Amino acid sequence: MKRTLPALAGLTWLLLTGVAHARIEADPNKDYAVTPEAGPWMISATCYVGPEAPNLAHELVLEIRSRFDLPAWVFNKGDDERKEYIERWRKVQENLPVEARVPYRGPRIREQCAVLIGGYKDMATARRALDHVKSLSPPSSNRLMPFYSRVVPVKGSEDMGQVEGGFVNPFPNSFVMHNPTVPLERHADSKNDAFLKELNAGESLSLLKCEKPWTLVVATFQGASIYAPKEASNGFLASLFQNKALNTLGTTGDNAHNLAEFLRKSNAGGFKAYVLHLRSGSIVTVGGFDQKDDSQMQSMRRALAGIQFGPTVPILPEPFAIEVPRPK
């Protein structure tokens, strides 16, 4: 008993002085919706779509907080879109005579919830933390993991195939993104840096070729973040990567280009995607627009939101507008 007293005294001192590490809160009764206060940069762990999305995202956030001791948050994109639509409807109603006003009958907006980890003060800090997140063990329940299936050709038959599939750990497919609730700060070198011409000289899908002044960023690649989904087994993804070694590291720029090609050739309509290589990584954008947040840009946002790309395609839960660089 006497030998335990110094240890207890030491523990008490740590607790009283605040030196001991305080674990991340994981209260089942709290929502943990992401806010600007969380930090400007996050790591996107996975995204759920459908009626159960809020519950699944909340469950995974609690597990990340309690099991891995990491600050995790929910970004409910569907809820944000719903509030935005209601606000537009309310403003229209205010300008109508009372007798002409009608009850709200908005569109059915599907639930989309992203699970985010962080935040971090800058992109570099988030990128360093990404390596740890990618190494996390799978969630404790299959219901929290995406399910992938593929058709494996049967030897000797061109018309038959065997369906294979299984649950996949989402963490290795995590990627760095900007906090969707924080306005993006533009840096001078990303718009007028003359070195951008050299960085993008060999890029066939270069954003510098876009004639419009605004575009929509849909994906970011920093450091060694790679887009080479191991689930690419048939269809367009298979043809896109048929001459590339899947599950191996490539350059950030190559993978940004691959994603832009995928979006351009997508069966969902073929988005006009561009690539911009920066000093710290690469971004993928979609479309060219005359003004920030004009009607065409809003339509593009809705079109992107209506497609289930899957967790292995690193599309941002909340695309954001930027000015097209015009380096001299």
Image: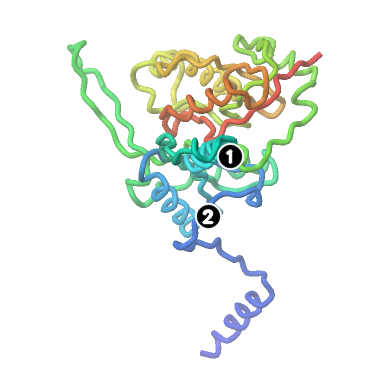
Identify the element where label 2 is drawn. loop
Q: Nearer the viewer, residue 133 or 84?
A: 84
Q: Residue at x 44, y 31 (%)?
A: 312
Q: Residue furthest bottom?
A: 2
Q: Residue at x 52, y 42 (%)?
A: 83
Q: Amino acid at mark 1?
A: Glu
| Residue picked out by circle 1 | 94
Q: Residue at x 69, y 42 (%)?
A: 122
Identify the element where label 1 is drawn. helix
Q: Amino acid at mark 2?
A: Tyr
Q: Image height check: is 280 above or below 116?
A: above
How is this picture coloured? rainbow
Image disc number at residue 248: none
| Residue 294 at x, y percent in the picture | 62, 24
| Residue 62 at x, y percent in the picture | 46, 56
Q: Image height check: is 66 above or below 181?
A: below
| Residue 161 at x, y percent in the picture | 21, 19
| 3D distance between C-alphas at marks 1 and 2 | 34 Å
Q: Are marks 1 and 2 in contact (CB under 8 Å)?
A: no
Tell me which numbered mark, 1 or 2, is placed earlier along the sequence: 2
Determine which quarter of the picture holds residue 198: top right
Is any part of residue 174 visible from this angle? no
Determine which quarter of the picture holds residue 166: top left
| Residue 322 at x, y percent in the picture | 68, 26
Q: Residues within 10 Å of mark 1 (few under 14, many from 20)?
A: few
Q: Residue at x 58, y 80 (%)?
A: 7
Q: Is residue 2 left or right of residue 247?
A: right
Q: Residues within 10 Å of mark 2 (few under 14, many from 20)?
A: some
Q: Image height check: is 228 above or below 172?
A: above
Give the label, 1 or 2, closer to the camera. 1
| Residue picked out by circle 2 | 32
Tell me the quadrant of the picture where the C terminus can be found: top right
